[in-house]
Amino acid sequence: MKTKHLYLLLALLGIALPYSQFVPWILHNGLDIELLLQQIVESRIAAFGWLDVIVSAFVLFVLMATEGRDRHIPLLWLPVLGTLTVGVSLGFPLYLYLREQSLEYSS
């Protein structure tokens, strides 16, 4: 299996796994932003997880902006959108997939 295909598979998992938890929560609670925020900070371990994701997303945005620009990686808006709508679990492997694809074309 090529590395770029592995990254694409990981991107699909990055959608499926988080949404397997989020969709049932939405179906049960609706789009209750107040409850969502309350549960995010309800415990220190939940806050730890969310802060980790926020920092990771910020680092990913910096990486995409700098390396993506330097390597002329196309469609950088896709992993940005993926990160904002799903999370780093989608945005990061999608970025790596686009990077691998760009490296193939430039070789």
Image: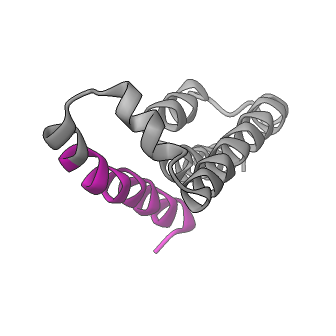
- Tell me which corner region of the image, top left, top right, bottom left or bottom right, holds residue 10: bottom left
Query: Residue 46, percent across and down?
Result: 54, 56
* Res 104 seen here: no
Q: Tell me what residue is drawn at x 36 percent, y 34 percent.
A: 35
- 87 in magenta: no
Give the image location of residue 83, x and y in percent. Answer: 53, 37
Q: Does 9 sit above or below residue 37? A: below
Q: How many marks?
A: 0
Quick check: 14 left or right of 93?
Answer: left
Judged left or right of residue 107, residue 34 is left
Residue ranking furthest to the bottom: 1
Q: Is residue 45 above or below residue 24?
A: below
Measuring from the top left, give residue 12's x and y in whole percent. 36, 55
Residue visible at 54% across and 56% down? 43
Overall secondary structure of the magenta section: helix
The way the protein has been coloured in the rendering is one colour
Q: Nearer the viewer, residue 20 or 69?
A: 20
Q: Do we see residue 18 in this rendering?
A: yes
Residue at horizontal 77 percent and vertical 29 percent from the top? 65
> Is 23 contained in the magenta span?
yes
Seen in the picture, residue 3 relative to 75 is either above or below; the reply is below
Q: Is residue 25 left or right of residue 75?
A: left
Residue range (magenta): 1-24
Furthest-left residue in view? 27
Relative to 1, is 39 above or below? Answer: above
Q: Quadrant of residue 49?
A: bottom right
Q: Specify whether 56 is left or right of 95.
A: right
Q: Position of residue 22 (x, y in %)?
A: 30, 47
Residue shown at 51% from the left, 60% from the top: 7
